């Protein structure tokens, strides 16, 4: 399963806590060292990991000092485990509700992100997802830059039996986006997905173009599509996208591979924006719903430890 | 006597306890530069082993000593020990004498890697560079899976042909070899090479579909393409954005190609890397280090943008500088 490796390591760290006869500073430090190593190997931002270590230590100390452990080793273990669990959930759960498309309303969704991260593929997957749930769905290809971009949309939308709009001759993405959205609104489509070119923060003109597309189509939700394998550049790039495009949701792609997605998790923490789906393959239906708590529980193999999850 | 001498000159023998905190912060530093954790660990461990027990002058700080040793180590890892001169390699093959009965095979390069890293785009940049150097190039569209993959290459070939027309004195040129979608990639590559041979092409650039390194059927199919066509170069395309995955991607691509492309497990592996999206990571260039450390193979090209001229050679000293900079 996704993230199995990270899960195994975190799990091993936690079970070594369970075997420890006493829970002292040394045991906690050793545990945190292992947890942090596992997170670093998963590409979680180096600064975030350092913060997590500090926060867990502070929380545990505060709880011990206030006598929450009632002097029992078992309770002490629970305090430590819960502190780690909560901080991990914090990493992937910004506590923000993402936009939910409404029936009978033209919901405009715009996909943005770095080059090659899976926007175009994900747009079709999203259209299929909403179409299956009874929304009349379509795709607007506002990528006039990448070679073969419209062919890609045309072929995959055709395969998915989803309506699409684009042009081989128009070179202005803003104009295409506006035309496409206007046309589909008129035709009473309910989910209108606008695909855009890949871009990066270092090219300000590309970012301006994104802002213009956004102003032209006024999306109800902008989605940042992010590759699970991204490393330490994740934070700066996603922050820049947040500042310019103010995305309201993240989709992490390529989670079917070996990547553990820690970079994407760091993007969540940096931008306080929730992940809504995971891309888990190249095919139309390879899209999983995402929810932070079950995700972390599964990650830690804590499915049977419900007590820990109560807040 | 030794200790008196040491005291007189203010020199000191480095111990583990002197080095540990400094090495630890170096490790953190490298990870912030996007070096994979495992690689940062190993490099710092190596630097530590080289320094422990060493006598050092009293005026040097341990920090400066470790930094110097790290710089040397990084330079060593990044400096290729095989040739990265692709033009030379192509010219050598094309000009080597052949028995008169035998027809010359074109020089072939296959581009492999995970999804979306920039294989097709950078293949086109390499093509542009080869045309400028007077070669006649055939692009083989062996990604028969991803929507639009063939059309993407067709657009590049059209653009490159137009660029070529504006500099007509060059004898170089480009054509696309494609058989649409759904077909066996290994077979198309074979046909393309034979078409290139019959039509006097110098180089065949083979585009392949992106695939995850753990996807065994797809990795086997790639190995089959390599085994059937025995290309002159296998270039792994990886992006500068990739974090710890760099290690797993490269080791598994290399291993799968070796294991699956021959029964004896001694098949061909990766010959070199092309690191793309260099323009998106500022000075967090650690992926380049992870990739070279894992394979011991050189970075042949660096992709630094989305136009045909955005292809560079790696400057080792610049990379080392970027990795050490605060
Ligand atoms: N394995 C896997 N591959 C994926 C997934 N999502 C997308 N891909 C692949 O990633 C590659 C890039 O996907 P695209 O959809 O073209 O990416 P993009 O963001 O639109 O790219 P640009 O428009 O060039 O910026 C393709 O090979 C896709 O098939 C996923 O969840 N899993
Ligand atoms: N900024 C930047 N973008 C790049 C670079 N190289 C490629 N890209 C972009 O990355 C995206 C994906 O490139 P492709 O060449 O389609 O990638 P691929 O590896 O062939 O993708 P698949 O065949 O789907 O696996 C495109 O938008 C390219 O323009 C680079 O060096 N810098
Ligand atoms: Mg796209
Ligand atoms: Mg490609």
Image (spheres, coloured by chain):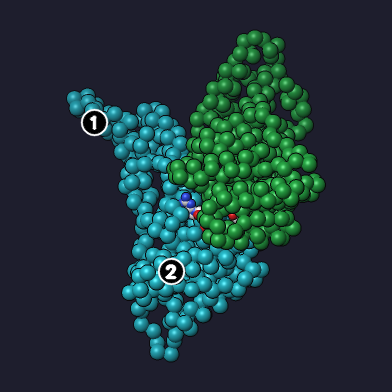
The one of B220 and B275 positioned closer to us in this rendering: B275
**Mark number displayed over residue B57:** 1
Residue at the limit of the structure toward the top, as seen here: A66
Image position of B253 (left or right of B215): left
Q: Which residue: 65% across, 38% down? A: A221
Q: Colour of chain A?
A: green
The answer to whether any part of residue A35 appears in the image is no
Residue A22 coordinates in the image, percent (x, y):
64, 19
Hey, which quadrant is residue B16 in on the image? top left
Hey, which quadrant is residue A167 in on the image? bottom right
The answer to whether any part of residue B74 appears in the image is yes
Label total for image: 2
The quadrant in which the C terminus of chain A is found is top right
Chain corresponding to cyan in the figure: B
Label 2 CB sits under 8 Å from any ligand 2 atom: no
Residue A148 coordinates in the image, percent (x, y):
56, 61
**Mark number displayed over residue A199:** none
**What is the chain identity of the residue bearing mark 2?**
B
Between the C-alphas of marks 2 and 1, the distance is: 63 Å
Residue A137 coordinates in the image, percent (x, y):
73, 49
**What is the chain identity of the residue bearing mark 1?**
B
Taking B149 as reference, is A6 above or below it?
above
Residue A226 coordinates in the image, percent (x, y):
58, 44
């Amino acid at each position: 399963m996704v993230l199995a490796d990270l899960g195994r390591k975190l799990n091993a760290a936690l079970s070594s806590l369970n075997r420890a006869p006493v829970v002292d500073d040394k045991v906690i430090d050793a545990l945190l060292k292992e947890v942090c190593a596992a997170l670093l190997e998963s590409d979680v931002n180096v600064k975030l990991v350092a913060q997590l270590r500090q926060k867990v230590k502070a929380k545990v100390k505060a709880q011990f000092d206030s006598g929450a452990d009632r002097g029992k080793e078992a309770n002490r273990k629970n305090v430590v485990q819960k502190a780690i669990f909560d901080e991990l959930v914090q990493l992937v759960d910004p506590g923000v509700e993402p936009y939910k498309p409404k029936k009978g309303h033209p919901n405009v969704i715009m996909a943005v992100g770095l080059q090659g991260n899976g926007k175009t593929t994900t747009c079709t997957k999203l259209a299929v997802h909403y179409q299956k749930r009874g929304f009349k769905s379509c795709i607007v290809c506002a990528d006039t830059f990448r070679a073969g971009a419209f062919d890609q949309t045309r072929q995959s939308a055709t395969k998915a039996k989803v309506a699409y709009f684009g042009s081989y001759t128009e070179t202005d993405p803003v104009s295409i986006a506006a035309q496409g959205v206007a046309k589909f609104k008129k035709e009473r489509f309910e989910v209108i997905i606008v695909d855009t070119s890949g871009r990066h923060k270092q090219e300000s003109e590309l970012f301006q173009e994104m802002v213009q597309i956004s102003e032209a189509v006024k999306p109800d939700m902008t989605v940042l599509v992010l590759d699970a394998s991204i490393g330490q550049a994740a934070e700066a790039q996603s922050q820049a996208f947040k500042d310019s495009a103010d995305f309201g949701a993240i989709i992490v792609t390529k989670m079917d591979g070996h990547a553990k997605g820690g970079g994407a998790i760091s993007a969540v923490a940096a931008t306080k924006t929730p992940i809504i789906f995971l891309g888990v393959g190249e095919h139309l239906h390879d899209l999983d719903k995402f929810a932070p708590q079950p995700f972390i529980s599964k990650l830690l193999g804590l499915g049977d430890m419900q007590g820990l999850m109560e807040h | 006597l030794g200790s008196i001498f040491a005291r007189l000159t203010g020199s000191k023998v480095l111990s583990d306890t002197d080095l540990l905190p400094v090495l630890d912060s170096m490790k953190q530093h490298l990870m912030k530069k996007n070096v994979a954790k495992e690689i940062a660990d190993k490099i710092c461990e190596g630097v530590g082993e080289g320094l422990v027990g060493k006598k050092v002058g009293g005026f040097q700080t341990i920090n400066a000593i470790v930094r110097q040793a790290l710089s040397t180590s990084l330079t060593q890892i990044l400096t290729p020990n095989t040739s990265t001169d692709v033009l030379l390699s192509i010219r050598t093959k094309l000009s080597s004498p052949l028995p008169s009965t035998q027809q010359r095979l074109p020089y072939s390069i296959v581009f492999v890697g995970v999804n979306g890293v920039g294989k097709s785009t950078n293949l086109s940049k390499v093509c542009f560079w080869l045309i400028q150097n007077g070669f006649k190039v055939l692009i083989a569209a062996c990604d028969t899976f991803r929507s639009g993959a063939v059309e993407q290459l067709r657009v590049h070939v059209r653009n490159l042909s137009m660029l070529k027309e504006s500099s007509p004195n060059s004898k170089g040129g480009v054509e696309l070899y494609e058989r649409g979608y759904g077909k066996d990639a290994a077979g198309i590559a074979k046909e393309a090479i034979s078409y290139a041979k019959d039509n006097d092409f110098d180089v065949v650039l083979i585009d392949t579909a992106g695939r995850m390194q753990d996807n065994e059927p797809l990795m086997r199919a790639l190995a089959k393409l390599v085994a059937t066509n025995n290309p002159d170069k296998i270039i792994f395309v990886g992006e500068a954005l990739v974090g710890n995955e760099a290690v797993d991607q490269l080791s598994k691509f290399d291993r799968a190609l070796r294991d699956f492309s021959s029964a004896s497990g001694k098949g061909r592996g990766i010959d070199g890397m092309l690191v793309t999206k260099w323009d998106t990571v500022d000075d967090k260039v650690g992926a380049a280090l992870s990739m070279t450390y894992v394979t011991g193979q050189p970075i042949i090209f660096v992709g630094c943008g989305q136009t045909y001229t955005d292809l560079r050679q790696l400057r080792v000293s610049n990379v080392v500088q970027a990795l050490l900079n605060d």
